[in-house]
Every structure is written in structure tokens, then in C-alpha cells.
Image: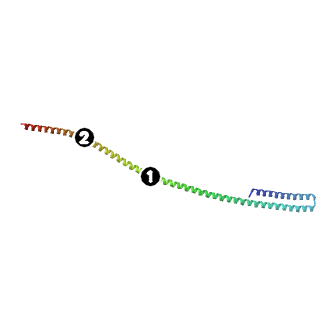
Amino acid sequence: MTQPAANSRRRQRSTRLVVAVLLLLGAAAAVAGTAVSGSWLATTVAGGFAVLLGAAATKITHSELMTSRVDAARDRAEQAQAFRVLDERRSAEGVEFAADMQGQVAKRDAIVSRLERRLADTAEELADARRSLTEVEEQLAYAERENSNLGERLGDAEERATQAVVRVAELEVEVDMLTAQWEAAEAALVAHTSIRKGA
């Protein structure tokens, strides 16, 4: 119900109630005035007139009461309608909020699932990297062992080479000695042959 209509009804009610009160006051004044005069006819007529005015005032008050009840019922119906509309709007907002929350939960679940998959992939990559590291460490240990073996073999080879150089030097000395002996023997043979020829 709009505010101007409510104000108009209030003015009509107050006017009707004032009229009813004035009718009752007029009836009381008429009865009091005729009672002072002492005339039975005037008092009877004034009493009848007072009853009529009282009935009119009662009718006005009753109609005002019924109008007030109808207006109150209309106001309650309008309020109930407004509450129903408000409740429907709030229900729609609640459904919309629930749908929005479900959407956000679904998004969060999708993000969590994606992160879990990425975590599983990362864990698998880490396991692969650890296996590769273990293989590399084993290869490095094997290479170090081989390097140590090669170092030992290199030392042995260098020692044998040194011994071979010494042996070669010794053989060269022996060859020189044998060559000198050979040359001396040849010279002696030549000398001996020339002496025999000269004799």
C-alpha cells in the first residue's frame, strides 16, 4: 500500500470518528436541553433523536471498524505478498550462491587434481633422476677402478720400459765390445796372414 493512500485513509477515518463523536455530543446536548425544559414530548422526541444519532454514530464507528479490519487484512496480505516475493528472491539468491559455491568447489577440485597429477609426474621424474644418478655413480666408480687399474698398468709398463732401456744400453755395450773383439780378431788374422805370406 502506497504512503499517500494510507494518509488519505487515515484522514477519512479521523473525519468519520469526529463526526460520530459530534453526533453523540449533539444527541447528549439535545437530551440534556429537553430535560431541562421539562416537556415530555420534547424529551421523548429528543430521546428518539438521540437514539437515531447514537445509531448513526454506532453505524459510522462500526463501518470504520470494518474498514480498519479490511485495511489491516489488506495490509497483511500485501506484507505477506512482499515477504513471499522477498523469500523467493532470497531462495533464488541462495540457489545462485549454492551454484556459485559448487562451481568454485569444482574448480578447486580440478586444480587439486591437476596439482596431484603434476606431483605424481614430478615424483616419477625424481625417481628417474635418482636412478640415473645411481647409474652415473656406478659408472663413475667403475671408471675410477679402471683408472686405478690403468695407472697400475702404466706404472708397470713404465718400469718395464725403463728396464728395457737399461737392457738395450747393456746390449749396446756388449755389441760394442763384441764389435771391438771382432775387429781385433780380424786385425790379428790379417796380421797373421801377412806374416805367413812374408815368410
Residue 141, percent from left and from top: 36, 47
Q: CA distance from mark 1 to mark 2?
A: 57 Å
The residue under label 2 is 165
Q: Is residue 114 left or right of residue 7?
A: left
In percent of width and height, residue 194 lies at 9, 37
- Whether residue 132 sits left or right of residue 51 in the image: it is left
Residue at image mark 1: 125
What amino acid is at disc 2? Val
Q: Secondary structure at mark 2?
A: helix
Q: Quadrant of the N terminus?
A: bottom right
Q: Residue at x 17, y 39 (%)?
A: 179
Closer to the camera in the image, 185 or 97: 185
Q: How many marks?
A: 2
The amino acid beneath tag 1 is Glu
Q: Position of residue 17 (x, y in %)?
A: 82, 58
Q: Is residue 185 visible?
A: no
Determine whether the residue tagged by mark 1 lies in a helix, strand or loop.
Answer: helix
Where does the C terminus fall, quadrant-wise?
Answer: top left
Indicate which disc residue 36 carries.
Answer: none
Query: Depth check: 27 or 173 in front?
Result: 173
Q: Nearer the viewer, residue 185 or 127?
A: 185
On the rendered structure, is 30 left or right of 93? right
